[in-house]
Amino acid sequence: MANIQWFPGHMAKARNQVQEKLKQVDLVLEIVDARVPEASRNPMMNQIVGQKPRIMVLNKKDLADPNKTAQWLAYYRAQGDEAIAIDAQHAKRLNQIPQLARQMMAAKIEKQKSRGIRNPSLRAMCIGIPNVGKSTVLNRLVKKNIAVVGNRPGVTKNQQWLKADDTLMLLDTPGILWPKFEDELVGEKLALTGAIADTVFQEDGVGLFGLTFFQRAYPAALKRAYHLNDEEMALTPADLMVVLSQKMGFGETFNRAAERLIFDARQGKLGAFTLEVPGDFDGHAE
Ligand code: GDP
């Protein structure tokens, strides 16, 4: 990921913007990609969110390994957050978010009622790095197409409160939050899942990373997808990539096979997968 430009100034700006808006909200919805719950977080958020009640929203549940999603939910709950897995694209389980928010903030709602406020309200800020599905989640929650124009550097957003229901008001991420690009493993995971643009990474490196991962963590799916025999499955990832390349009709052109593998993984041809598990972000532990 060497060619990604990293500006410390942008980082500081995003942090300040979040910190500023955080004062106006009761809780935070942190949206991550369920296939890479940690790699798809902004590294500063834990510290900034601090003690604010938080719901970890593991989106793209449909693409993730259900067993590992269950492990992540348990992990975040053990850390003191609420956690939920959803599929925003197909509008699955989203209505549980406002419910969960109300449940978490029951004391505050009661307090407002006891003060005579007839329509108690909660304010939440959605945070997430680009591509985790934040716009999709927000659109579904407010039940209309709102123009979420974040995700592009230099675009000043017109921050507005969005109404999810009678109790819950939502605010989109102020500014852009980047993942931990400087960590190569994070970059590879994000590239494989499609969270970062194809123009900024080398296919062969990411493809080989993916192949190594699937060979170890999901061998049956890999074997099935490319009709591999046991002997081929026992090859080193680099040799296996050559075999794949031949099978795909690309001869020995390694990077076309890598490109195809990345495409297939993103399309779900290799089944649902999760690249990391709690306590071992390399995905080893089962
Ligand atoms: P944002 O950059 O965080 O606002 O992300 P978007 O809402 O634009 O979503 C990025 C991509 O992920 C889009 O192609 C969405 O259709 C897709 N997406 C969002 N949520 C889901 C989901 O739950 N499942 C799947 N399979 N795709 C999703």
Image: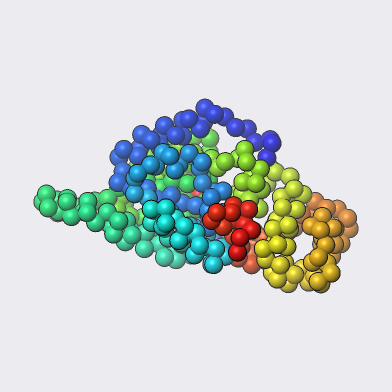
* Residue 67: x %, y % from top left: 54, 67
Q: Residue at x 57, y 29 (%)?
A: 7
* Residue 187: x %, y % from top left: 64, 45
Q: Residue at x 60, y 32 (%)?
A: 6
On screen, residue 111 versus residue 217, left or right, reads left
Image quadrant for the C terminus? Answer: bottom right
Q: Is residue 119 visible?
A: no
Query: Which of the 4 image quadrants contains residue 184?
Result: top right
Which of 233/75 is in front? 75
Which of 137/78 is in front? 78
Q: Is residue 181 visible?
A: yes
On screen, residue 234 versus residue 88, left or right, reads right
Which residue of the protein is positioned furthest toward the right in this rendering?
A: 251
On screen, residue 108 versus residue 152, left or right, reads left
Image quadrant for the N terminus? Answer: top right
Query: Which of the 4 image quadrants contains residue 260?
Result: bottom right
Q: Residue at x 65, y 36 (%)?
A: 4
On screen, residue 27 versus residue 182, left or right, reads left
Figure disc tally: 0
